[in-house]
Amino acid sequence: MAIVKKEYIFEEKFKVRDYECDLQGIVNNANYQHYTEHARHEFLLSRNISFADLHDKGIDAVVARISIDYKKSLKSGDEFVCKLYVEKEGIKYVFYQDIYRLSDNALCAKAKVESVCVINGKLAASCPELDVLL
């Protein structure tokens, strides 16, 4: 059976800052998680969904698991884009996020971020506020 790759539905551009790099001169691995998180937040805001507003309604979207495959290193000054699409898998909202260096379109990282909704302190099977993303 062939695997069908989904189309990206959002992208956010970034530029590597000096302090994000380690002694080897490459972006420290933890910063890729920051990049993907910022892109997800911007994606939600582009769909008029605010984490603060959700929280005020008793809804918290929380990360349950993240996996990142590092492909090529980003360096200080590199411009890059984080592209994403989202799917619903059971109770999870799964964000597939890929980071590409803009200068050569090299795939630098692939992330899979699994999130769930907690409504009024209880794990929810679904969240109408996030189902509109699908």
Image (cartoon, grey):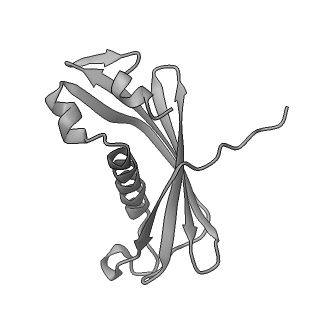
Query: Given the current orientation, which residue lies at the most extreme left position?
Result: 56
Position of 107 relative to 84 (above/below)? below
Q: Is residue 36 above or below residue 22?
A: above
- State the residue in front, 67 or 4: 4
Please give the name of the residue rendered at 43% of the width and 84% of the height, measured from the top-left corner. Answer: 77
- The image quadrant that residue 31 belongs to is bottom left
Identify the residue at image location x=25%, y=41%.
Answer: 50
Q: Nearer the viewer, residue 27 or 23?
A: 27
Residue 63, percent from left and from top: 37, 37
Residue 53, position as x, y percentages in the image: 19, 36
Residue 83, compared with residue 125, is above or below; it is below
- Above or below, 115 against 29 in this view is above
> Residue sitting at 21 percent across and 19 percent down?
121
Q: How many numbered markers are drawn?
A: 0
Q: Percent from the top left, x then y, of residue 116?
A: 38, 28
- Residue 76 position in % (x across, y down): 42, 82
Residue toward you, 28 or 47: 47
Q: Quadrant of the N terminus?
A: top right
